[in-house]
Amino acid sequence: MKVMIFGATGMVGQGVLRECLLASDVDKVLCVGRSPSGQRHPKLEDLVIKDLFDYSAVESRLTGFDACFFCLGVSSVGKSEAEYRRVSYDLPLAAATVLARLNPQMTFTFVTGRGCDSTERGPIMWARVKGAAENALLKLPFKGAYMFRPGVIQPLHGVRSKTLLYHAAYVALAPVLGLWRALSPDAITTSERVGKAMLAVARRGAPNPFVEMADINRLGS
């Protein structure tokens, strides 16, 4: 497979990239973002684009891919709905619209979050915006589109959050997270399982376009 990752420097993206580089059936990984992935590997390429709303100059490098893992995202804390919507709705739709045209046989996976609001009318801003993004992406003419809805993710294998506060929290809570995962397996997942689950969906699809925590853990086990 030839796969593309958006947001490979974030916590989820790092985990997905690791699993893609380890997978024997993945022969090319293109990391798309405003900065390089920071990693070196024979099957890894970086495509640095300063404006992630405009792909007109690089379309030739975006063709021939089997899967796209869109892991790019930001926290809604401190942002207006318009600001959050630009990054969490407008940006993924800009990329996905181009990719659907160039790669109609592509499987597209989008990292949203547990509790997304598919009605787009609920009281929680981030859930409305992410729900709207999910709905719009599912209308695009991909071979398959899947909305990953993880909750708490335990980073493994050196994966770390770019947000210092989140990273410190994960380090402090690491023993608790392991115990929590053992006692309530569907309440928490890991960066490794998310990556493996995305690859499983790229290979074989999934019964439901909304991939919840239990599905992630099952597919990634």
Image (cartoon, rainbow, N blue to C red):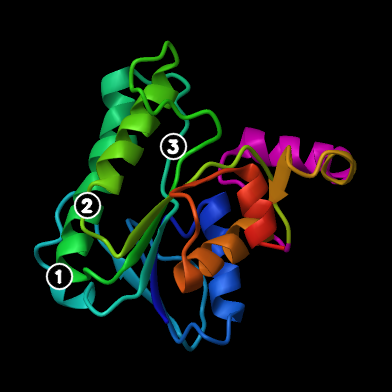
> In the rendering, which numbered label is found on residue 74?
3
Q: Which residue is mark 2?
A: 140
Residue extending farthest to the top is: 123
Identify which residue is drawn at 67% across, 61% down. 192
- The kind of residue on which mark 1 rests is Glu
Residue at position x 65%, y 36% from top?
A: 166
| Residue 169 among magenta residues | yes
Dot 3 falls on a residue whose secondary structure is loop
On screen, residue 182 above or below 195: above
Choose the circle earlier in sequence order: 3 or 2: 3
- Residue 6: where, in percent of width, then height? 38, 58
Residue 106 in view (yes/no): yes
The Cα atoms of the two marked residues, 3 and 1, are separated by 25 Å
Measuring from the top left, give residue 173's x and y in whole percent. 82, 37
Callout 3–callout 2 Cβ contact below 8 Å: no
* Viewer-nearest of discs 3 and 2: 2
Residue 59 tag number: 1
In this picture, residue 205 sits left or right of residue 54: right
Q: Is residue 54 left or right of residue 190?
A: left
